[in-house]
Image: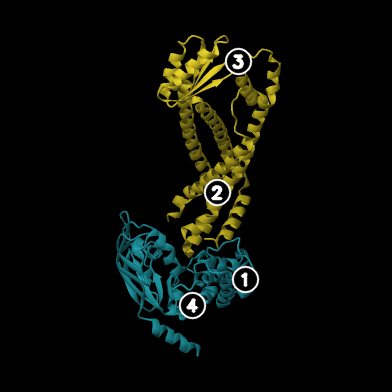
Amino acid sequence: MKKYSIITMNTIFKGKPMIRFENVTKKYGENIGLENASIHILKGDFVFLVGPSGAGKSTFIKLILREIQADEGDIYLDNLCVTNLSNREIPILRRKAGIVFQDFRLLEKKTVYENVAFAMEIVHKSKKEIRRQVPQVLSLVGISDKAYKYPEELSAGEQQRVAIARAVINNPTVLIADEPTGNLDPKTAMEIMDLLEKINSRGTTVVMVTHAKNIVDEMHKRVIAIRKGKIVRDDIGLYSFKDEESLEDTEEEIFYV
Amino acid sequence: MFRTMGYNIKQALSQINRNKAMTFTSVLAITAMMLILGLFFVATININLFAEVVKQDFDMVEIYMEDDTSEGIIKQIAIDYEGQESINKVEFRSKEDALEIMKQRWGDSGYLLENLGDNPLPNSLIVYVADAQTAKKVAESAIDFDGVEDVKYYQETVEKLTQATDFIQLASLVIMIFLVLVSIVVVSNTIKLTVFARAKEIRIMKYIGATNWFVRGPFFVEGIIIGLIAAAISTGLVSLIYDNIMSIIGADIIRILSVPIVPLEYLAINLAIIFAALGVGIGSCGSVVSMRRFLDK
């Protein structure tokens, strides 16, 4: 029954582009962040973004969230033209995209419940909605029993679950995860991957930046590899060592972003 | 906006609580600035009032008669002037009337005039004129009449006074603007500290999609609270100082000099309004200034 619904979700929504990069170039002075990159990520996709440090993965994420502005090309998130947004409209964009970081970035002075509720307060949800939705999401990520604990009382895996809960509470169309398993042991990392897959199965597009070969191989999803600002691979499959090939092999100077 | 007001106030109070020393310093600095401003204001408003009162006498020339001038001559002079252009009215004021007016002006201290014995005040004619030039003409011609002892008119005094008050107003305006700018810098520095203390939190808020105004709200309220506290203290202090100065000079002396004085209650209410508006302005500007660069990202 559950399996069936997953399939239909993905079939219905696949095809509608969620993230579109059209010939995007971003340079930092002489250094290339991204060069003439075109990427289409569809609704319901689960995409790994791999590549050596400094290859342009962070640039990619910063461009989607409009932390930085592209030099050339257009970027779309769902129906928003990211590159054309005014500064005032950036919050609208960020509400469409949930984000999870390697270092969790929870508010230490707030409980688990408050951390998640905070994301709803920011978008002016009513107290009633908050009371209804927060427990649901906490149960989705499997930390209902820790609702009134503070982040420092939780394990790393549990903290990441809170961060994911916070990222998805406002029903973003896209979930961006920047090395979400980077600080976790392999077993916990796989648990987090299960959770991300669960969220993906509900129709949320997931883009995950990672270096973890075992995870990419295990999941067998679409892999986009970036090197020196260029898309060098975009297919479904296993992690290739070419993806991680160090840029030190080349003589060029690298700008680490 | 209103739904988040409770949140903003709660956050602002906790920020102030966490940052007591800096809040105190800011309040102190703004209070000092408002104190200077307030004393300027008090001085200016009193000078203005004084000028206004003197200006009321502007349309008036007083011709003082020698004591032995007969009533006939006085009447003749009066008739002379009454016919002329630009003269509204000529009024005879006897020695007795003059004394009565003085007694009234001195109020409670009027009894001091009871023991004068001989009335030292002269008979006089009051010529009401339409403009300053006529006043000058009347004054110049009146002194030539036999039986006229002295002529008094206020044109020059009024002109000088107007110049002086204009200058004082301009000077205090410049000083006020300067002080307000200094205060904004002081407040913005205080708030910058709380902003830095919450930098991580703000970055997370921005990632989740908080608008700039949502992030700014608590700091905005913090600035306004600092401004309002300073306003309350300043209003109290300036009123106290003013009251003290007035009681040292003494009400009687003020009345006898016939200098009008702005009453404390009137002043306190106005100061409170002005300081509150200023405090809110300084506080909100300070918070916006301190966050400007921070929210650009």
Tags 2 and 4 on a common chain: no
Are there few (<14), some (14-19), or many (20+) residues within 10 Å of tag 1?
some
Relative to A189, does residue B217 appear above or below in the rendering?
Answer: above
What color is chain B drawn in? yellow
| Residue B267 % position (x, y) | 60, 37
The residue pinned by badge 1 equals A147
Q: Which chain is cyan?
A: A
The residue marked by circle 1 belongs to what chain?
Answer: A
Label 3 crowd bin: few (<14), some (14–19), many (20+), radius 10 Å:
some
Q: CA distance from mark 3 to mark 1?
A: 92 Å
Callouts 4 and 1 on one subunit: yes
Give me the residue at 48% from left, 88% from top: A3
Q: Secondary structure at mark 1?
A: loop
Q: Residues at badges 2 and 4 in contact (C-beta under 8 Å)?
A: no
- Look at mark 2 in the image and give the residue it sits on: B223
* Quarter of image, res B119: top right
Q: Earlier in the sequence, mark 4 or mark 1?
A: 1
Q: Nearer the viewer, residue B219 or B296?
A: B219
